[in-house]
Image (cartoon, helix red, strand yellow):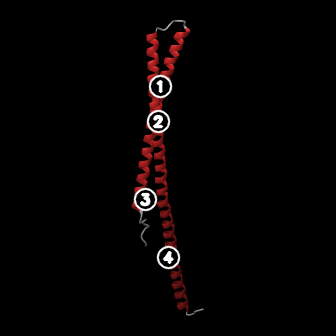
Amino acid sequence: MSKSFQFPLQKVLDVREIREDQKTVELKKAQITLQKEQQTLDYLNNRKDQILQNHSIEKSDGRLLNSLKLHQSMDYIFQIDSEIGAQKKVIHTREKQVEKNHTELLHAVKDKKIVEKLKEKQMTDYTKKNRKKERVKENEVAIRISLKKCLSTGSLK
């Protein structure tokens, strides 16, 4: 009986599978971080909208706002605008990180697939060679049996 197929680059394939798994985890973490940053931006935008809405409600009621309250509201709105701008920069950075991680994952997948295809090809070649050896052995056995029959009957054709 012949030994079973052993892929000589199995360790390389294993390393590439581990690398692909790591890149998948990194991408997922980056996506989660981006999502959290986007939620922070949404919170800041909602907070600004609430302040602006409260300001317009007070104005529509006909009440006069004292200048101190108006000044504080405007300062707070400017502060939130500044935070929104900074948050947009953070999101942009996180988006680039997600894109980079996605590209790295694609490369890891391609690298793994290359070795997997090589393994499949070698496995197919191995299987074909084994089948051919088995057929040769079967043919030899069949020829021996035929020769035995011919010799035992005394006739060679």
Look at the numbered disc 1 and give the secondary structure of its residue. helix
Q: Residue at x 41, y 62 (%)?
A: 10
Q: Nearer the viewer, residue 80 or 13?
A: 80
Residue 13: mark: 3
Mark 1 or 4: in front is: 1
Give amino acid for label 1. Asp
Q: Residue at x 53, y 80 (%)?
A: 139
Q: Badge 4 is on which residue? A: 133
Give amino acid for label 2. Ile
Across and down, in percent, residue 27 comes to 45, 44
The span from disc 2 to disc 3 (Cα, nearest Å) is 35 Å
Across and down, in percent, residue 23 comes to 43, 48
Mark 3 or 4: in front is: 3
Q: For the residue carrying disc 3, how many other residues have a C-alpha within 10 Å: few (<14), some (14-19), or many (20+)? A: many
Q: Residue at x 50, y 61 (%)?
A: 117
Counting residues from the start of the chain, the first of labels 2 and 3 encountered is 3
The span from disc 1 to disc 4 (Cα, nearest Å) is 77 Å
Q: Residue furthest right?
A: 157
Across and down, in percent, residue 99 comes to 49, 44
Counting residues from the start of the chain, the first of labels 2 and 4 encountered is 2
Q: For the residue carrying disc 1, how many other residues have a C-alpha within 10 Å: few (<14), some (14-19), or many (20+)? A: some
Quarter of the image for the N terminus: give it: bottom left
Mark 2 or 4: in front is: 2
